[in-house]
């Protein structure tokens, strides 16, 4: 069984990762960590996940783990500060990583890429198999339709999500840029206001925050006379967890390097 360390164990995703990993009986959860001072420190990860006592307590370090219980992979769906704390530790200790944290700056992403020179890291803005297939479709659609079609990206998430636009929306916009041969940083416009027409070649990005919405993404291609819409709706966070668990199985034994979910799925 693959031994895993759950980073951000007290979060919504961390708890679901623990629940599905434990229930699957394909993974051995050997550690669960949170930031120092978290109110879940000392609690049993199984009880936090709602699957009963498991025998692994949440800690703020991994110094207590023995060689027999050393993690093969750390799975991290925490916050940027958590990821940037644990990535160097995993690099130093030779632990592969599956990272789903969003809202990372370009410099933070560069640090992750640097860490991947020593350990294999899967880093993706979304672990849904459907979304990753959609990114390939969007790139092909953009290439086929060309610059005559306007491109807009919209995303809807729950009111508690801190980063906007979502990592998934950025993935989709970058896929459109790939197909069009444009640079993300040069063409993306976040929202609109004022009294100016749409600029040729721009990609509009729109973020909504509503109630407990898990995740909805749409990419629109519009020309005079027609609109083509590609959409994806996530009904439960378990969609992302199952993809991340698949990534864990895939990354074990891989050479150091920075991988994404398309690599995992062979797309």
Image (spheres, rainbow, N blue to C red):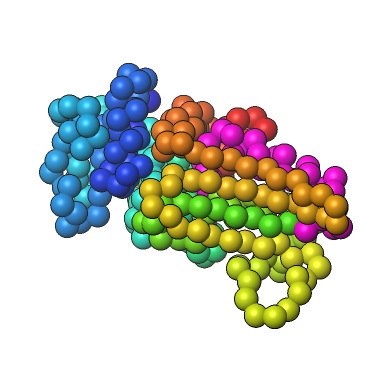
> Could you say which quadrant of the image residue 25 lies in?
top left
Q: Is residue 252 left or right of residue 145?
A: left
| Quadrant including the C terminus | top right
Name, please, the residue furthest toward the front. Answer: 225
Depth check: 214 or 132 in front?
Answer: 214
Q: Is residue 92 left or right of residue 115?
A: left
Residue found at x 67% / y 49%: 219
* Relative height, residue 169 to residue 31 (above, below): below
> Is the N terminus in the top left, top right, bottom left or bottom right quadrant?
top left
Residue 23 in picture, x, y percent from top left: 31, 22
The location of residue 156, given as percent across then percent down, is 51, 52
- The image position of residue 118, as x and y in percent, is 49, 46
Name of the residue lying farthest toward the left:
42
Q: Residue at 14% of width from left, 41% of height from top?
A: 43
| Residue 57 falls within the magenta-colored stretch | no
**Image point 30% across, 47% down: which residue?**
11
Where residue 243 sits in the image (x, y, percent)? Answer: 49, 32
Residue 117 appears in the picture as rendered: no
The region drawn magenta spans 122-150
Residue displayed at 24% across by 54% down: 35
Task: Name above or below for residue 238 compared with residue 121.
Answer: above
Q: Residue furthest bottom?
A: 195
Asked whether 243 or 88 is in front, the reply is 243
| Residue 263 sits in quarter | top right
State yes or no: residue 132 in magenta: yes
On the image, which quarter does residue 6 sit in? top left
Task: Answer whether residue 152 is visible to the viewer in this image.
Answer: yes
How many dots with numbers? 0
């Amino acid at each position: 069984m693959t031994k895993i360390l759950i980073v951000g164990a007290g979060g919504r995703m961390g708890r679901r990762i623990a629940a599905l990993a434990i229930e699957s009986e394909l993974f051995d959860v050997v550690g669960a960590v949170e930031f120092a001072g978290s109110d879940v420190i000392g609690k049993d990860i199984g009880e936090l996940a709602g699957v009963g006592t498991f025998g692994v307590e949440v800690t703020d370090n991994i110094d207590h783990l023995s060689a027999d219980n050393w993690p093969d992979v750390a799975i991290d769906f925490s916050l940027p500060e958590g990821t940037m704390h644990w990535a160097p530790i995993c690099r130093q200790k030779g632990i592969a990583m599956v990272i789903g944290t969003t809202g990372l700056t370009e410099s933070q992403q560069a640090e992750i890429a640097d860490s991947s020179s020593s350990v294999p890291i899967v880093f993706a803005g979304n672990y849904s198999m459907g979304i990753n297939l959609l990114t390939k479709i969007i790139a092909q659609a953009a290439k086929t339709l060309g610059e005559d079609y306007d491109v807009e990206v919209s995303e809807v998430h729950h009111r508690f999500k801190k980063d906007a636009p979502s990592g998934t929306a950025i993935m989709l916009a970058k896929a459109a840029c790939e197909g069009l041969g444009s640079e993300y940083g040069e063409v993306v416009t976040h929202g609109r206001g004022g009294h100016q027409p749409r600029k040729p070649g721009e990609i509009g990005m729109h973020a909504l925050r509503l109630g407990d919405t898990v995740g909805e993404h749409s990419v629109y291609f519009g020309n005079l006379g027609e609109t083509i819409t590609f959409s994806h709706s996530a009904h439960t966070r378990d969609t992302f967890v199952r993809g991340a668990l698949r990534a864990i199985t895939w990354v074990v034994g891989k050479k150091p390097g920075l991988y994404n979910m398309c690599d995992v799925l062979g797309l």
